[in-house]
Each structure stands twice: as structure tokens, then as C-alpha cells.
Image (cartoon, rainbow, N blue to C red):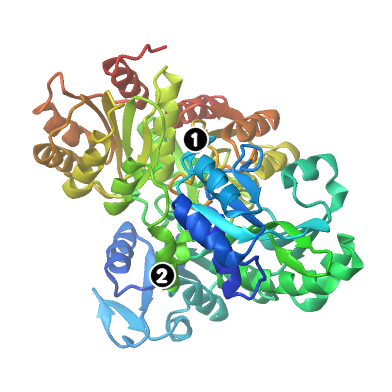
Amino acid sequence: MDLFEYQGKQYFSRFGIPVSPGGVADTVDEAVATAEKVGYPVVVKAQVQVGGRGKAGGIKLADSADEVRTHAGNILGMDIRGHVVKRLWIEHASDIAKEYYASFTLDRAAKLHLGMVSAKGGVDIEQVAEEDPGAIARLHIDPTQGLDEAAARGLVEEANLDPEAADGAVDILVKLYRCFVEGDADLVEINPLILTPDGRVHALDAKVTLDDNAAFRHPEWDEFRGLEVLDPREALARQKGLQYVGLDGFVGIIANGAGLAMSTCDVVEQVGGKPANFLDIGGGASAEVMANALEVINTDEKVKAIFINIFGGITRGEEVANGIVAALGRVEIRSPIVIRLDGTNADEGRKILAEHESDRLMSLPTMIDAARRATELAGGKTR
Amino acid sequence: MSVFVDENTKVIVQGLTGGQGRFHGLRNRDYGTKIVAGVTPGKGGQDVDGIPVYDSVADAVAATGADASFISVPPKGAPAAILEAAAAGISFVVCITEGIPAQDEARVYNELRRQYPETRLLGPNCPGIISPGKCNIGITSGDIAMPGGPVGIVSRSGTLTYQALYDLTQKGVGQTTCVGIGGDPVPGTNFIDCLAAFESDPETKAVILIGEIGGSEEEKAADFIAKEMSKPVVAYIAGVTAPPGRKMGHAGAIISGSKGTAKAKMEALEGAGARVALNPTQAAEMMVEVVAGL
């Protein structure tokens, strides 16, 4: 789960990482009230989970209530690269002497934690990595050993942060690492980490991605959840416990297993179609799970045909077929359905499906043929 | 020959008394796998369909001489279960548990590397390993595999692995071993471990590698194939149409920035001399050609 900036800052605060005082606002009036509380000058910041907010006009400085009113009015409802701004974060503006960068993440290749610090903050770090890789100090950390103050200091020195920032930066790095590990994050990033003219160091931005697998030990994450901006199809899928990712196409996809679901999307595209979604119903294919999946796909008005791609392993072909038939009895489906059933007892399964075949429901033995038929039924051109 | 396991592998099931553990453990035994014991703390002295249950892995190992473990316990308990198996001297641990926090996985991986370098972990979040006709640990359906080789399979995905196994079997091409390394960010066993094992296994003559988006393991595998492998490799990568920044089911299947795309992986594998298929069925067809030309 990706946190919004303000949530990330709230999360940082739990671990003692200094952030600017501020508050959230969903309306212009709330924005003014928050600004009055925080004290001018303030920064009005769009809360969207996409980069480039500043360039898009989603971050503005305000010296008075009138200015807050103007900026908040402009920014609320603004579309920033497909993300509509519904919430603002109003914080006291900081004087900035220097902008740095700091982050911790898992280096999957090395299978170790990776800490990165740079004196070149406030800009796209991937660009820095490309143009001036030497400007980023990196440290691999063994998760069984952790990061101590000495190691954090070494990282700060290697990154050539200004000497007056060193103590503050070291303190923040140690806390940020704790936030990363104990806070079960996949990524914690501060860009920029700033040095103020009076020598204080603090986080001016916060990017935090939490590991959904660790939710069981973080009941406090619930408060972040209600505010996620989900595609309505994804919200319904989550409610039904399905692994769903919305895409832009017109062929609805249901498959068992993440790999097969991805592969199904690929094959649809290969034959000239466009997948409308990724949907993994997991190992089995019970009537209930299948009905839930069909219900989710059914809400997607762009879907013109559905491709169900199931490989029967331990769940045998006839069980899968019976599950599909039962699910069809429960849900009224708008679009024609093409099924490809393969694996253990696939023939028996196909026999069961054959009894129910019509121009709305058909079964084809191979992935490619089924993808082609589904694409044609959806009105797409196949190749 | 097979890799990592064979007909003599003695397996305990951690979590045998649970629903999943019992279901798959008994299926594995029915396949012919030597399932010698179960482990569930507090349930020592009981049995599951005649398989004795012990309180700890150490007790089970002492009583049975087991050398492999099949872990089917929930995410909360799985990290401790893996380390317990390693501490008891188990050399091959298969963990099918899905949903272990990444921080725990990274910690366990490095703990194993430091403390128990003799223990190989397969998974977590993997379908397991099957050496057709000899040993099946995990959730793969034994019916779809065919003994006798000459193909080895290594895969990050469950159902795609089954698809490859099934397609080969349907076409009369057997397998030496099929290893599912799982779709998590920190797998205990990676592509290279498996490719190296297949390269040195005399009965394996060719390898199918099934990858997916996310991470850089396929690129590293490509490098290994180019430099170290004499046996032909057919590869398939899922997720060409996956959008960046979205997790496609597996925790590890996510394109971040410009890294981890299917296209980059396919190009790397092709550059390494592997034949790259556009779908799993085509991979099996290519392998049939490869085997015919051996």
C-alpha cells in the first residue's frame, strides 16, 4: 500500500522523524482554518500518489488566508496525470538551505537492505542515478545486523552532506531505518530531506510503501486504508478477496494463478485484443470464487467478452467445469464467455461445459484459440 | 537423476495437522514420497493417517533421520518454522506459505546464509518440487508429470509450471525435476541455483525457465546461461502487458520504474542464446523440437 505524503509524515512521526507541522484539508475552508493554526507562510500541497506535483501546479506557497483560499480552490479537483486531487496537506513553510535525499529499500538482487543518501536532493533521484551515480552513497545492510549510528554516519559522510547537517541526518537515518524495518515498509524515502538556515534537518516530503503482507501485525494501518483511491472495480474485487488489477481493454480476464493470469493478458494482446483486467482467482476454482470473479468483471462496462482460463491441477477439470456452470447460474453476465480449460481431467470438464454451450458460452482447447475467439466476440480485430 | 531431491529423500511436514498440511502431505505420500513424520508443537505423540507427529523438528529428525521438510504453516509462524528446520539439521526446506512479510523473508534468508549455509530453502510462496516418479514435495499434482527426463523445469509461477509440465507430458516428453522457486521478492532458491543443478545433472539434457516481471533474477539467469550453461534453455516470461507500479498477484511481480519489464528479460535471455517463447504452450512446443534434436 502506497501512503499519501501526509500519511507518510504521520508514519514518520511515530518513529520520531521530524516533519513540518501541518494538517489535512478537504475543502477550501478547512485549508484556511488549518493554515491559521499552522501559521504563515504555509505550503498548500496536493495529496496524490503520483510524481511531478510541483510542476503540475499542485504545490503552492501562501502568505495569507486569501492566498490559501485561491491556491486551495485551484488545487482541489485538479487532475494531476490522471489523479484528481481530493485532499490537501497544509504545512508551515520551511526555509531551505540545502536539499538532500535519503531512502531505505530492499535490494532484491543482493537480498539485503539498501540505504541511499545523496547531497543532491529535491530532484528526481533516478535521474541523478543516471547522470551522476557517484552523487549517491549506497550502503548494503544485512537485515540480521541492522543499521547502527556508526554505519549511518559513514553513509552521511560518504554522501558529502554539509558538516552542520551530519548529526541531524544521522539521527534521522537511524530512525528512518527503524521505520523501514519495524514499520514493515517496502520503501521509505525522504526527498527532499532539508537543512534549514538555522541548522535543523527534517523531512520535507515522505514516500512510504507498506508491505501488505505485514498488515496482520499493524492494526494501525486500518486508518490509512479507507482513504486509498481505488478504481471501483478494484474496490469490489478487494471486498471479495480477489487479486485484481484494472487495465484499459475490452476483454475481461479470469485465470487461476498469478503467472497464468499475466500470461492470459499477454496472449490476448498477442492476438490483437486488449485485456480489461488481471484477475487471479487462486489455486482452486470453486463456484463461489468464480461467481465473485464474474460479478467483478460484470461491473466493467468496457468489457465486451470474457476469457476464463483455468488450468486444473489438484482441482480437477470436472470440478472446475461444475464450478463455472454453477457460477453462471448465480450471476447474470452481460458479455459472452470463452473458456479454456486444461490440465487434469480437462476432457471430462469440457464435456460438462459442452452441455451448456451457446453463442454466449463456448469452450476452446487452447489458450491462443480461446484468446482469439474472445477478442473477436468483443469486436476486436485479431491477428 | 534428479536435482535437490530423489527417491531416498525423507520428508517431514511442518504443519501436518493443519488442513493444508494434511491434504498436501498425504497426497505427497500417496505419490510415493517418503513422508516420515509431521511436526506440530503440542501435538507430539499423535498421528495423521499413520504418520507420527512430533513436537519439534529436532525430535522428528532424531526419530526418523529426515533430511527434508515441507512447511505448510501460516505466514506468522513460517519464518520460525524455517529456522527451526535449519537448526535441526534439515538440508532442504520447502516452504509453500504465501503472504510472509518481506522484512521477515529478508531476515530469514540472511540468517540461513550466515548460520546454516548447508540448508537450502525453496520458496516461500512456491508450489514446491517434483521429481517425477521419485519425490513430490508441495502442491503440484503428480498426475501431470512424467518420469524419465530429459527436461528440467524451473519457474517463478505455479500454474504456468503446471501448464509446462502438462504440455510436455502430453507430448510425451518427460522431466527430471520441476522446481517452483516462487513469486516472492526474496526467494531462498533462485534461477541460477536451479540452472547450475540442472547443468551438472547428467540426466537433464535441456531446461525450461519460466519467469515473470519484477526484480532482475531473469537477467542474472541470462548471464549465467551465456557463461556457464552448455545445455539448451527455452524460456518464457509472463507479464508483457503488465503496467508499471502495479503488483500482479505475486509480491515480487512488480515493474518499478524502467526495471523488471518482461521485454528486458526476454531480450536478455535471447541474447544469452536461450529460445524465448511467447506463451507457455509455445515453450513446450519449442522444447519438443529441442529434445528431438538432442
Number of marks in picture: 2
Q: Residue A123: horizontal and vertical position, in percent?
A: 75, 46
Q: Which of B166 and A322 is in front in this view?
A: A322
Q: Residue B80: horizontal and vertical position, in percent?
A: 49, 77
Which residue appears at 91% of the width and 68% of the height? A163
Q: Nearer the viewer, residue B69 or A102?
A: A102
SS state under label 2:
helix
Does residue A201 lie above or below A287 as drawn?
below
Asked whether, in this view, residue A47 is left or right of residue A373, the answer is right
Q: Is residue A15 visible?
A: yes
* Earlier sequence position, callout 1 versus callout 2: 1
Q: Hey, which quadrant is residue A353 in on the image?
A: top left
Q: Residue B96: horizontal and vertical position, in percent?
A: 42, 61
Q: Hey, which quadrant is residue A370 in on the image?
A: top left
Q: Mark 2 points at which residue?
A: A216
Does residue A45 lie above or below B104 as drawn?
above
Q: What residue type is labelled 1?
A: Gly
Q: Hey, which quadrant is residue B264 in on the image?
A: top right
Which residue appears at 35% of the width and 41% of the height? A279
Q: Mark 1 points at which residue?
A: A82
Q: Quadrant of the C terminus of chain A?
A: top left
Mark 1 or mark 2, which is nearer to you?
Answer: 1
Q: Mark 1 lies on which chain?
A: A
Does residue A372 lie above or below A88 as drawn?
above
Which residue appears at 32% of the width and 67% of the height? B21
Q: Can residue B152 be seen in this view?
A: no
Q: Distance between the residues labelled 1 and 2?
A: 32 Å
